[in-house]
Amino acid sequence: MINPKRYLVTAALPYANGPLHIGHIAGCYLPSDIYVRYQRAQQRDIKYICASDEHGVPITIRALKEGVSPQQIVDKYHALMKETFSQLGISFDIYSRTSGKTHHDTSSAFFKKLYDDGLFEEKETEQYYDEETKTFLADRYITGTCPVCANPNAYGDQCEKCGSSLSPEQLINPRSMLSDAVPVKKKTRHWYFPLQRYEPWLKEWILQGHTEWKNNVFGQCKSWLESGLQSRAMTRDSNWGVKVPLPDAEGKVLYVWFDAPIGYISATKELTDQWADYWCREDLAAGQAGTKLVHFIGKDNIVFHCIIFPAMLKAHGGFVLPDNVPANEFLNIEGDKVSTSRNWAVWVHEYLKDFPGCEDVLRYVLCANAPETKDNDFTWKDFQDRNNNELVAVFGNFVNRTFVLMHKLCGGKVPKLHEEILDEADKAMIAEFQNTKAEEQSALEFYHFRDALFQVIELSRKGNQYLQKKEPWKKVPGGKIQATSAENQKLIDNCIHICLQLTANLAVLINPFLPGTAKKMLYMMKVVDKMLDWENAGKPNLLRVGYSLRPPELLFRKIEDEEIKAQVEKLKAGLVKPATIKKMEETKSTGNPSSDKSSAGKPEIVYDDFAKLEMKAATVVACEKVKNADKLLKLEVDLGAEKRTIVSGIAQHYTPEEMVGKQVIVVTNLAPRKMKGIESQGMILTAEDSDGKLQLLKPENPVSPGSVVS
């Protein structure tokens, strides 16, 4: 294997249209950070690149929903994501943004070169158009009923409920998200990149040259290539994005997947004047490759990073190509697919507030449970178990016991190693330092981060077993050090010395995964960051004999059942039902949730479907806030013949005092559901106004409790 002279690592550019959730982190940001921290410890020349992707339909859709400009959206979420990455210890060399001048100039120049070289095909096609807003509609601007699962809220490119890839033509009752109008077809002109020209080269480069890629990556590329590539439009009709640098291209911008990967190049330009050393040089002399380019992504981005972007780089010429694209699968949450529209997500910025000082715990759990080869499931119970049973009870326990015993049995100093009395257990424990280093290094080099982390935890587990076998505390008669024989003190010294050297090794080995924890360990050992260099891993003499060490500090805390219960209830309480999503989208897009448009696009039903609902007027007779739930109120309602308890997510819109005495409409034949341990026996109907406030649906004039709504 030819050793590269430089490393260039990129992590997929996140859309600046919302906060980061744990699926983002597990997908590419944590794996890439672990890899980069390891390479830095190896003292290798490496640059770690990322940026906010601030163009494309997701940005404009978010702006539409929030009633603000796209620029306001990207400014808001770029700042939030940058801060979240920093707090979680994701150590980019630069975190840029694609709305900057350097990126616009770089993307424009890239497009212009391909255009000047005659590589684009100019085509006139028919695309969907909103006649009310005079706007061409990207697929994501069109919603309708999914032909596969009948989800009424499917997008023109995908149904988020069943996962089917769609086109607007397949939707039943398609509607424009801008005006709710029925879209029509209209001619428009765009520039297409002829991917099929690069198909023979891509087949040779990937199918013959990169068989070492992960199975999910290689398999998806193989499927695309064997199905045959087609020309792909690289421009869009929009006013938000990098403008097409041609005189006759008014109102057109570069396709987001054309300009976004170029963001890796433009961000590197912003980082260093020597950017071309990383992107444009091979330096094959002296048996060295130039740059090893590695793209860390999620599986939904494989085609763009493995086929489209490499073809663009090949067409342009002069750029290095990716050496590897280690894409992860998806991380589900509590058995269900992450959905930002349904708010089924664990938001990282909220986690950081709820669990201060536990940044490394999230890093640990997401790596230990990483979806490296298949979709995995995050559960709060597993989060608690891994923290309490592995970090606290194994890794943290070993380090703490070692330091406590050192201060109790060795005067708070690193004791001498008496080599003349080392036994087989001592020698085997010391040998594990080097063995673990070799195993972890091999796993990290080949992107097997779960396996690498396992090796470190297993080493700490072996340390606990060694300590338990040696039982140095039993070699102190009556607990008095002064009474300890010279022979016993030597045995104590050897055990504690080996455990302290193991602790130092653990700091080096755990650093790529849990950098905050490694820093705490350095502080306790009173050593500098230089000790974390990879060359020190495996050494049995990192701590100097006679050196005084600080008292122990707990590396991790136990996470209690109440904390986990609160997080599960928070997740469930925040879930937005599909019907609510639809209503919110219609309200945001029109500014006026008129009854005419609120039902447009939904599948037609018969009277018998409606008749299944039992709705009654009720009077609220008592109300209180639900503990540890910001959004929930517990209401007692009078339905005439009976009283019921209902839990409703309206606490941010109404106080308990306001609710008492109000009449509401209740769906009374829903199956009971527990929320925060309270059984809710119905649902109160509300509507969201243009300002985002929930309004209670109620009779125009007071009626008797229990009156049937029909």
Image (tube, helix red, strand yellow):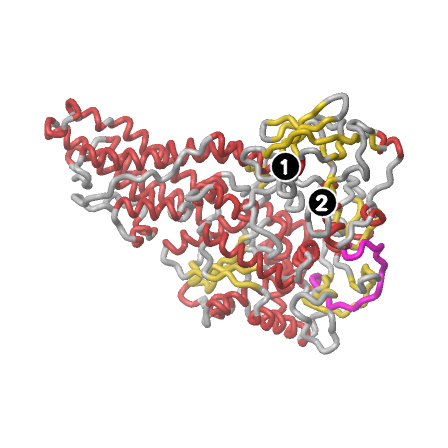
**Disc 1 residue type?**
Glu
**Disc 2 residue type?**
Ile
Tell me, for residue 657, which label it has, or none: 1
Residue 496 image position (x, y, % from top left): 22, 35
Residue at (50, 60) in percent of width and height: 95
Residue 140 is drawn in which quadrant?
bottom right
Q: Which residues lie in the magenta part?
A: 177-196
The residue carrying mark 2 is 581
Q: Which of 470 and 635 is in front in this view?
A: 635
Answer few, some or many: residues within 10 Å of disc 1's Cα (few below 14, many 20 plus, some between 14 and 19): few
Residue, far bottom: 247
Answer few, some or many: residues within 10 Å of disc 2's Cα (few below 14, many 20 plus, some between 14 and 19): some
Q: In this view, does 215 lie above or below 311?
A: above
Residue 220 image position (x, y, % from top left): 64, 49
In terms of secondary structure, where does tag 2 sit? helix
Residue at (20, 24) in percent of width and height: 474
Any part of residue 708 in sight: yes
Of the 4 image quadrants, the one containing the N terminus is bottom left
Residue 315 image position (x, y, % from top left): 63, 68
